[in-house]
Amino acid sequence: MSIQDAVKWNYRYQTPHRSARCTPRSFLIEQAAVLPLHGLALDIAMGLGTNAAFLSARGLRVIGLDISEVAVRTAKARCPQLQAAVVDLSHFTLPPATFDVIVNFYFLDRRLWPLYRRALKPGGVLIIETLTRAMLAVRPEIDPIYLLEPGELRAAFEDWRVVAQRETWLDDEGWQRAVAGLAVQRP
Ligand SMILES: C[S@@+](CC[C@H](N)C(=O)[O-])C[C@H]1O[C@@H](n2cnc3c(N)ncnc32)[C@H](O)[C@@H]1O
């Protein structure tokens, strides 16, 4: 387990901070019409579980994973029906054709993308959104490895049906963010 990541995120989640968002991501809410009403969903790096709770409230069974035990405990308290586990996603695999929905918000590990391709059932929906290189204009200290290149997400899933995509600046609870979002369906 990446001890530094766990320590950093546990500290953030224990401290009153902007990380403590309590609304689901807008790009997830916007895809509500394509989400199945039952089945199994996976929330990758779920944080405090707001996206997971949204999926659960819509009728999906949800597994939420995060490296922060504080996040996992908080998410579970918010949404008791959630199946939540402390996991280091940098050393992880997923079973094939298991999930109806996978969501991955604001956590970029490109090594997971081939796993998503395998782990979704045919017809399953993948929703990803995170920061892009355009962020460097306002936050030059961010390591570019954690930022998406223009068009990168779409290229990684070019053979899947696009449900929605955007590359834009967002006002996210008062913070300006350059983001790319992609919702795609496995053939
Ligand atoms: C910016 S937050 C995003 C949380 C949530 N997905 C959201 O949209 O609000 C990034 C999350 O990634 C988690 N994380 C960081 N490194 C991780 C790792 N190696 N394995 C699992 N989770 C990790 C952090 O604990 C944190 O909750």
Image (cartoon, rainbow, N blue to C red):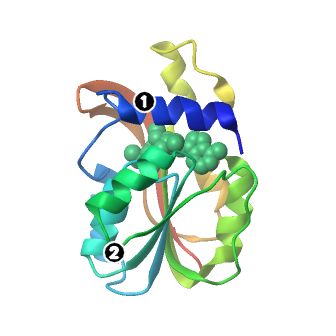
Local crowd size for mark 2, using a 10 Å CA cut-off: few (<14), some (14–19), many (≥20): some
Quarter in which the C terminus is drawn = bottom right
For residue 83, which numbered disc appears in the image? Answer: none
Q: Is residue 94 left or right of residue 139?
A: right
Q: State yes or no: Cβ of the residue under disc 1 lies below 8 Å from any atom of ligand 1.
A: yes
Circles 1 and 2, Cβ within 8 Å, touching? The answer is: no
Residue 175 rendering spot, x and y as whole percentages: 30, 25
Kind of residue at disc 1: Arg
Please give the name of the residue rendered at 23% of the width and 32% of the height, measured from the top-left corner: 173
Task: Name the image quarter holding residue 1.
Answer: top right
Asked if residue 185 is positioned above or below residue 110 in the image, the reply reads below
**Residue topped by disc 2:** 81
Q: Nearer the viewer, residue 152 or 61?
A: 61
Residue 11 rendering spot, x and y as whole percentages: 46, 29
Please give the name of the residue rendered at 40% of the width and 54% of the height, measured from the top-left corner: 73
Residue 16 rendering spot, x and y as whole percentages: 29, 27
Asked if residue 107 is positioned above or below residue 3 in the image, the reply reads below
**Residue topped by disc 1:** 12
